[in-house]
């Protein structure tokens, strides 16, 4: 496990004229984190995990974690985007962090805003993680623009590898994530309508199956029992807290483990599928494509090519 080393990869501002808008989004995944501040007009972002979109207006910010299937709509307006690592990957150049799927989607509003749990392996075991929504209404959008602008300037000069730039990146990224969590909590995320501490504690324990008393691939019933909740109440609380149901969340975790094995080992795809509980390789391939946006074979080829 490595300590936090924030690293700036890409930062820019983009404007789209009305006559250039397509009102659609091309799905993609990224290998780092991205913050997108909407500067003017309105836009929407697609959540591949949830099969729908979330609107984003002026002064709102989108938080996009690694390996999250999403699409940013080509709507009139402007935004400021920053790509960064929490654990530096200096060998990955800008633009090589983006994987396009070729799929195009149209706006389809979701009834909720998906949430992400940002945790750190080196943190204290009982330290609460950051709960960050896909889209947050900021309390001081002008301050955000002012704080993120130096990163755009650093990248425009290709001066991201100086000691000054690295220290500035660490300072601004740290401020951004802390403030985003505070703004989200102020907006009601992390309170009773969204967050159940029993669910958050359970999610943290899923990374420690040997110590939590849970199997590596627990059932939804086992999770509800571990949380000390009835099955229906557990499902409702999990959906409010995580922005997706427990079954979908567990499936995504299995696919994430499979994706790491595809990228980091030479094991056969069938063997990796069986290790994650998929006896039918065709079913595994369908689920993998739905979550990742590529087939297992395409994903491995892309990662090996990189």
Image (cartoon, rainbow, N blue to C red):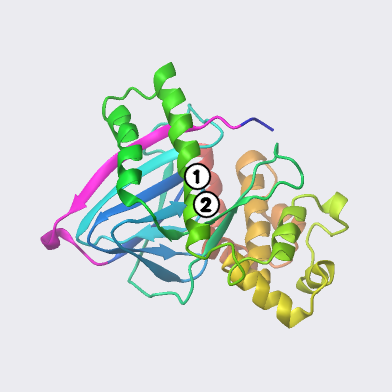
Q: Tell me where residue 83 appears, x and y as whole percent.
A: 41, 41
In the rendered structure, the answer to whether residue 280 lies left or right of residue 16 reads right
- Viewer-proximal residue, 1 or 28? 1
State the residue position of label 1: 177
Residue 24 appears left or right of 299: left
- Asked where in the image residue 206 lies, by quadrant, the reply is bottom right
Question: Which residue is at the far top?
Answer: 163
Work out whether residue 245 can be spotted: no
CA gap, disc 2 to disc 1?
A: 6 Å
Q: Residue at x 48, y 27 (%)?
A: 91
Image location (x, y in percent) of residue 108 = 37, 75
Q: Which residue is mark 2?
A: 181
In the image, residue 22 lies in the stretch drawn in magenta:
yes
- 249 or 295, which lies in front? 249
Question: Measured along the vertical axis of the image, is residue 9 above or below residue 193?
Answer: above
Residue drawn at (76%, 48%), measured in percent from left and top? Answer: 126
- Quarter of the image containing the N terminus? top right
- Which type of secondary structure does the marked residue at label 1 adopt? helix
């Amino acid at each position: 496990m490595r300590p936090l080393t924030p690293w700036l990869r890409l930062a820019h501002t983009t404007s789209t004229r009305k006559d250039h808008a397509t009102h659609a989004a091309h799905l993609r995944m990224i290998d780092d984190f991205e913050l997108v501040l909407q500067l003017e007009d309105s836009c929407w972002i697609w959540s591949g995990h949830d099969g729908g979109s979330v609107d984003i207006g002026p002064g709102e910010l989108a938080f996009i974690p690694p390996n999250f299937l999403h699409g940013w709509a080509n709507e009139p307006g402007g935004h400021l985007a920053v790509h960064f690592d929490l654990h530096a990957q200096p060998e990955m150049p800008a633009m090589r962090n983006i994987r396009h799927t070729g799929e195009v989607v149209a706006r389809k509003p979701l009834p909720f805003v998906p949430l992400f749990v940002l945790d750190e392996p080196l943190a204290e075991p009982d330290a609460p993680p950051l709960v960050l929504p896909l889209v947050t209404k900021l309390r001081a959008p002008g301050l955000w623009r002012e704080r993120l602008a130096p990163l755009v300037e650093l990248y425009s000069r290709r001066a991201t590898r100086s000691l000054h730039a690295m220290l500035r990146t660490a300072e601004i990224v740290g401020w951004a994530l802390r403030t985003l969590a505070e703004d989200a909590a102020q907006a009601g995320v992390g309170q009773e309508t969204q967050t159940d501490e029993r669910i958050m504690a359970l999610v943290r324990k899923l990374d420690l199956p040997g110590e939590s008393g849970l199997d590596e691939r627990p059932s939804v019933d086992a999770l509800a029992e571990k949380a000390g909740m009835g099955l229906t109440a557990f499902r409702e609380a999990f959906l409010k807290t995580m922005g997706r149901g427990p079954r979908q969340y567990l499936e995504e975790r299995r696919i994430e483990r499979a994706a790491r094995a595809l990228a980091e080992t030479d094991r056969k795809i069938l063997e990796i599928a069986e290790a994650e509980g998929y006896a039918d390789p065709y079913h595994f391939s369908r689920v993998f494509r739905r979550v990742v946006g590529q087939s297992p074979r395409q994903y491995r080829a892309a990662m090996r090519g990189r």
